[in-house]
């Protein structure tokens, strides 16, 4: 389905000259993703899916876990594409019910249909589909060859997406940084894959899992066996492979690229980089850790120890360095690094309880992160009719594609739009793990699994870093709710009456006038933000479905 859609959109882009068709293409892509979601959901009931079904000669495999997260990727991607599928602002008329019988409303003001760069790039949905295809392949991969092809398909799409806004020097610089360091990470992945093949003689992950699970090889085995089977080699190969993927998910100590890239690229692109690119890699990690961490390398280290070290460093670095940030997307980058530490901690424990916590944490954080970035964009759109006399904001670069760049730009926003401010505060409190929000239960599940398995020190560090990270979340809340607003209505439109005409086929019917306070956010933004905020806020009243799904998937993994 995705491949056919890719070819169709590619051919359509090649023959199209109108840049304004990009909105239409984004809407078509949403329909494609929703149809793919339906097909994926329908195939969840296939026989033998719990044990796994090999595809394309063993290059890929389909399981309940892969199908569930493919469905999740499709739905989250469709939500992100809403940002470029509809105009962000509309006019609210008090007598709108009376206008339904008329055909057309023509606005004489350019304020509504002001097109940002994101609405002019027809290649945007095509690149998104390439990234999603790579992510779906990576989730289902079961061969070293398909691993590298999938991660590169996803990564090259992200590189192009980062630099697609040609009018932004910042985005070009950030995309170049992302490309160079991402290429270095790919070298580690390729080197690790080559070493695994050299030591095992197979590219199939199933074969590598079988070799890694051999536990009866000791000092009494023959010299011939010892000559080809070297547990240290497998560990080192998996460790090098792991380093490449830790680069991709910006886990410490390989995190240094993410704050610069997050801050440089447009916010719409940051939303995709921060969410989709990580989900697929974590799900690939899930099966890799599960089937290799139980091998008995009695006198040697296990490669999964590196995940614990990375988890510890991510927790500390993400929390401490986030305290010094004054740019909002750089702060979100360090926040992501801190949460990656929680996810890696749950992943590396590899028990039924920890895997359940891992699945639940990954899903809830992806939804919370999506809501945070959508709110950040919505805040920028809602400030369109306002101006700020603070001179330091006039020197900000790329304001069209990233309207909110500094934390101080949201000072007193509660007095402009209370509902958006409350939604943003709820999301930040969930990041901090404040009960009874969904983020609290996710962190509690991870910490409980860590304590049950004897990771007392890491648990204490995680609790301490959660308290520290709450400080910079509360600082944003303080700026929004307790500081005086610096924004004033733009004097150019404060006293101006703007007009719209209602027409039929037979001509003019009526004229309407509206002012700046009639300009509101579009329904697609408000409805999506409302749904995500309610999920975060009201999880305590409907926990059964999410927790049961996480538990079932964890049990399937351990029983397969």
Image (cartoon, rainbow, N blue to C red):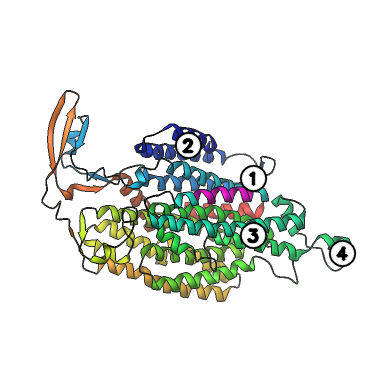
For residue 410, say whether it is visible.
no
Q: Secondary structure at mark 1?
A: strand
- Percent coordinates x, y for residue 504 in the rendering: 18, 27
Is residue 525 left or right of 30 when viewed as pictured? left
Q: Residues within 10 Å of mark 1 (few under 14, many from 20)?
A: many
Instruction: Identify whether 52 is placed above or below 283.
Output: above
Q: Which residues are magenta?
A: 146-158
Gap between marks 3 and 2 measured at Cα = 34 Å
The residue nearer to you, when weighing 385 against 448, is 385
Is residue 423 left or right of 52 when viewed as pictured? left
Q: Secondary structure at mark 3?
A: helix
For residue 113, say whether it is visible.
yes
Residue linked to disc 2 = 35
Gap between marks 4 and 2 measured at Cα = 54 Å
Magenta: main secondary structure equals: helix
Q: Which mark is residue 221?
A: 4
Q: Residues within 10 Å of mark 3 (few under 14, many from 20)?
A: many
Residue linked to disc 3 = 241
Asked whether the residues under the numbered discs 1 and 2 touch, taking CB atoms below 8 Å apart as contact, a structural biologist would say no
Question: What residue appears at the point 71 percent right and 49 percent down from the top-left corner?
Answer: 204
Q: Which mark is residue 61?
A: 1
Gap between marks 4 and 3 measured at Cα = 28 Å
Is tag 4's residue or tag 1's residue first in the polypeptide sequence?
1
- Which numbered disc, 3 or 1, marks the residue closer to the eye? 3
Q: Quadrant of residue 186?
A: bottom right
Q: Quadrant of residue 505?
A: top left
């Amino acid at each position: 389905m995705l491949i056919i859609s890719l070819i169709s959109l590619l051919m359509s882009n090649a023959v199209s000259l109108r840049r304004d068709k990009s909105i239409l293409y984004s809407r078509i892509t949403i329909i494609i993703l929703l149809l793919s979601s339906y097909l994926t959901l329908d195939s969840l009931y296939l026989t033998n899916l719990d044990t796994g079904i090999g595809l394309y000669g063993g290059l890929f495999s389909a399981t309940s876990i892969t199908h569930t997260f493919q469905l999740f990727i499709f739905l989250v991607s469709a939500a992100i594409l809403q940002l470029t599928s509809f105009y962000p602002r509309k006019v609210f008329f008090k007598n709108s019910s009376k206008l339904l019988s008329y055909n057309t409303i023509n606005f004489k003001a350019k304020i509504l249909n002001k097109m940002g760069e994101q609405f002019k790039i027809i290649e945007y949905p095509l690149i998104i589909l390439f990234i999603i295809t790579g992510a779906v392949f990576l989730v289902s991969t079961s061969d070293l060859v398909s691993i590298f092809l999938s991660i590169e398909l996803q990564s090259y799409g992200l590189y192009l997406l980062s630099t697609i806004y040609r009018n932004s020097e910042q985005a070009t610089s950030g995309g170049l940084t992302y490309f160079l360091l991402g290429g270095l990470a790919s070298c580690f992945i390729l080197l690790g894959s080559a070493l695994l093949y050299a030591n095992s003689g197979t590219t199939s992950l199933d074969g590598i899992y079988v070799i890694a699970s051999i536990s009866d090889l000791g000092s009494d085995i023959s010299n011939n066996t010892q000559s080809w089977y070297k547990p240290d080699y497998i560990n080192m190969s998996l460790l090098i492979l792991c380093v490449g993927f830790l680069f991709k998910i910006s886990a410490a100590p390989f995190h240094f690229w993410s704050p610069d890239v997050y801050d440089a690229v447009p916010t719409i692109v940051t939303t995709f980089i921060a969410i989709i690119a990580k989900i697929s890699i974590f799900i690939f990690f899930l099966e890799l850790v599960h089937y290799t961490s139980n091998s008995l390398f009695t006198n040697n280290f296990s490669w999964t120890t590196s995940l614990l070290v990375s988890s510890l460093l991510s927790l500390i670095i993400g929390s401490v360095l986030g305290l010094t940030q004054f740019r909002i997307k750089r702060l979100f980058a360090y926040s992501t690094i801190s949460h990656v530490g929680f996810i890696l901690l749950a992943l590396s424990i590899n028990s039924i309880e920890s895997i359940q916590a891992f699945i639940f944490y990954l899903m809830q954080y992806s939804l919370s992160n999506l809501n945070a970035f959508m709110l950040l964009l919505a805040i920028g759109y809602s400030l369109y009719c306002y101006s700020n006399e603070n001179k330091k904001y006039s020197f900000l670069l790329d304001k069209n594609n990233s309207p909110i760049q500094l934390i101080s730009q949201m000072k007193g926003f509660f007095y402009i739009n209370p509902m958006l401010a409350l939604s943003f505060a709820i999301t930040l409190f969930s990041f901090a793990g404040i009960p009874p929000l969904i983020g609290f239960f996710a962190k509690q599940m991870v910490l409980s699994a860590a304590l049950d398995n004897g990771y007392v020190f890491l648990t204490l560090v995680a609790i301490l870093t959660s308290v520290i990270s709450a400080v910079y979340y509360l600082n944003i809340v303080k700026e929004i709710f307790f500081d005086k607003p610096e924004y004033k209505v733009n004097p150019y439109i404060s006293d101006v009456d703007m007009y719209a005409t209602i027409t039929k086929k037979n001509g003019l019917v009526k004229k309407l006038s509206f002012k700046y306070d009639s300009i509101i956010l579009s329904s697609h933004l408000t409805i999506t933000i409302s749904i995500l905020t309610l999920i975060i806020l009201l999880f305590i009243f409907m926990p059964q479905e999410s927790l049961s799904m996480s538990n079932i998937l964890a049990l399937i993994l351990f029983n397969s």
